[in-house]
Amino acid sequence: MIDMRNLETFYAVAQSGGFHRAAEKLHTTQPAVSARIVQLEQQLKGRLFERDKRGCFLTAKGRALLGYAERMMALRTEMVEAIAGGSALSGVVQLGASDTIVHTWLSDLLKGLNREYPDVTLEVNVDTTAALTAGLVDGSIDVALLMGPISTSSAENLPLCSYAISWVVSSDFPLPDKPTLADIVQYPIITFARSTKPYWQLKGLFDEAHLSNVRIFANSSLSSIVKMALDQIGVAAIPKHVVAEQLASGRLRLLQTGHDMPTMSFTASYFRRPDMPLNPIVAELAQKIARVFEV
């Protein structure tokens, strides 16, 4: 009888392209992965993988097995959901999130997942969109809440929310509520990291206004950007949703220049995989929660 754990291990190696990466994905050791593959090869009387310096690759027998493994894992998930309900699903989900999501509604998503799927363990990775996209592709991240959509073949992208960039300053910052762009650039502009889309969109805004002497303080930490705004280092260019609490308390205020501001659009991106039935569930719940926070 074929052990489902061995099939899961086989699928993980096939998807990741290596025994070490499969071991990391399965939270086990490389020797354990190798032992399961050997057992499976003995049962099926043939090699499933060939290895070289570039990694490991499916043999003809391995490619034939892959389709059966996918169907068996999908059927098992279907059986569990049909008999025990979705709350019976368990496992570890590597969830990637952009800093903006962390500062708006990620906590509500984690609470919802914990309530509806109590046997699911979440590991949260906060990073840039570029890093999260790379993580999706190499399999180290299962679901990513990022500025999307991503164009990688076969990726699923569920729209989440769109946040316009706002000008944010401390309550007693020396600028009127409706300054010009020329007024704003007299001070440092504190915004997202140079590698992000908002940074270059803001730079384009200043270029179109023929404002060349702009000091943009790029920062990869939203918490740091907010702190710098509170400390009157300069004018923050971030979504107002991130600082809703500080705006409500009067510690920060918004500036209006009358210009159309860049918009950050987010998606829940993932790959459909028979060994990860929670991917679409997490993405769909994220979509539901994000809509509440978009207003």
Image: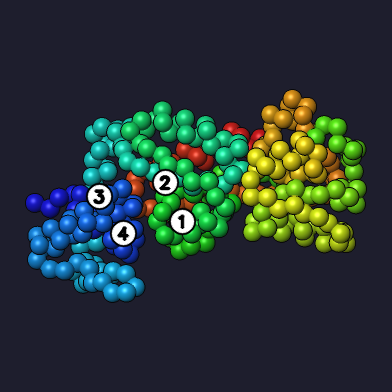
Q: Residue at x 86, y 51 (%)?
A: 185
Q: Are marks 1 and 2 in contact (CB under 8 Å)?
A: yes
The amino acid on which the numbered mark 1 sits, given as a three-letter code, is Gly
Q: Are marks 4 and 2 in contact (CB under 8 Å)?
A: no
**Label 1 vs label 4: CA separation?**
16 Å
Q: Is residue 115 left or right of residue 80?
A: right
| Above/below status of 288 relative to 209 | above
Residue at disc 3, secondary structure? helix
| Above/below status of 220 relative to 90 | below
**Label 3 vs label 2: CA separation?**
19 Å
- Residue that label 2 marks: 94
- Residue that label 4 marks: 20
Q: Residue at x 45, y 48 (%)?
A: 143
- Residue that label 1 marks: 135
Q: Are marks 3 and 4 in contact (CB under 8 Å)?
A: no
Query: Mark 4 or mark 1, which is nearer the start of the sequence?
Result: 4
Graded by Cα atoms within 10 Å as few (under 14), some (14 to 19) or many (20 or more), the crowding at tag 2 reads many
Graded by Cα atoms within 10 Å as few (under 14), some (14 to 19) or many (20 or more), the crowding at tag 3 reads many
- Residue that label 3 marks: 73
Residue at disc 1, secondary structure? helix
Query: Mark 3 or mark 1, which is nearer the start of the sequence?
Result: 3
